[in-house]
Image (cartoon, rainbow, N blue to C red):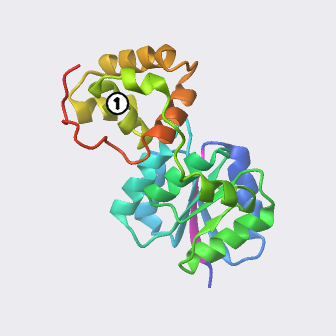
């Protein structure tokens, strides 16, 4: 009997490679989707036994974290394997915390993917061997940068929501701000924290705000 697997990735080469690798044994019935929205539609139609998903697609940096949480709410029984280019152990930990059952980097040996699918399909977790140790030790938080002390409550909340994989639009909705206001805050945060790009800001948010909204902060704070 074949196992129905849904792969969600916006790189055709990645999907083609997965199809070649996973279907040659004849035990996997692979379906593909090129966006998170399409992935949800296909998921509802075919009810896959396992989902393989990338984290960062055209929808935005690490939007896959939010997507994984949505999958967990939709059907918590379906195991999810993240197949990502990101080797940062903090990102991997964030994905597992969001509800993923496994994490495999895209330059891993092909056998790792098949092992990962077998493990998560049997109720176990699987993490790429070359980053598993880094993930284990990444739980110890580093000393906080001095720049964090200068952040306003609103800036901290924006970073906390960003750490959850939310887009500017989602953050704006959560904090009752405009999209433009959120974009302005993020643009202001980059030089304030010594960062150059949005991916760097996302990594910073995951590193220092891994637990979501800071404790004791109001939902709509004043600067």
> What is the magenta segment's predominant secondary structure?
strand
* Crowd rating for badge 1 (residues with CA inside 10 Å; few <14, some 14–19, many 20+): many
- Along the line of sight, the residue nearer the viewer: 92 or 105: 92
Residue drawn 41% across the image and 47% down it: 66
Element marked by disc 1: helix
Above or below 23: residue 149: above
Quarter-of-image position of residue 77: bottom left
Above or below 34: residue 168: above
Determine if the magenta segment contains residue 106.
no
Residue drawn 62% across the image and 79% down it: 2
Horizontal and vertical percent for residue 211? 39, 48
Quarter-of-image position of residue 181: top left
On the question of residue 60 being in view, the answer is no
Horizontal and vertical percent for residue 102? 58, 64
User: For the magenta stretch, what is the residue range?
Assistant: 3-9
Horizontal and vertical percent for residue 195? 56, 20
Residue drawn 78% across the image and 71% down it: 24
- From the image, tell me which residue sits under label 1: 156
On the question of residue 44 being in view, the answer is yes
Quarter-of-image position of residue 110: bottom right
Residue drawn 74% across the image and 66% down it: 112
Horizontal and vertical percent for residue 1? 62, 85
- Along the line of sight, the residue nearer the viewer: 29 or 80: 80
Above or below 200: residue 38: below
């Amino acid at each position: 009997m074949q196992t129905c697997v849904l792969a969600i990735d916006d790189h055709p080469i990645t999907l083609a490679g997965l199809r070649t690798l996973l279907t040659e044994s004849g035990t996997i019935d692979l379906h593909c989707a090129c966006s998170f929205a399409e992935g949800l539609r296909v998921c509802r139609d075919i009810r896959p036994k396992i989902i393989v998903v990338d984290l960062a697609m055209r929808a935005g940096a690490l939007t896959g974290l939010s997507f994984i949480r949505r999958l967990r709410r939709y059907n918590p029984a379906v195991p999810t394997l993240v197949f990502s280019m990101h080797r940062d152990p903090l990102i991997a930990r964030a994905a597992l915390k969001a509800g993923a059952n496994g994490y495999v980097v895209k330059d891993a040996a092909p056998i790792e993917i098949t092992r990962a699918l077998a493990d998560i399909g049997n109720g176990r977790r699987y993490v790429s061997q070359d980053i598993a140790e880094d993930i284990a030790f990444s739980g110890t938080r580093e000393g906080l940068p001095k720049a964090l002390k200068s952040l306003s409550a609103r800036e901290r909340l924006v970073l906390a929501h960003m750490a959850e994989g939310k887009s500017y639009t989602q953050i704006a909705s959560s904090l009752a701000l405009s999209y433009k206001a959120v974009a302005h805050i993020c643009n202001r945060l980059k030089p304030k924290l010594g960062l150059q790009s949005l991916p760097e800001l996302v990594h910073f948010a995951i590193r220092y705000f891994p637990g979501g909204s800071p404790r004791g902060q109001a939902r709509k704070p004043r600067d």
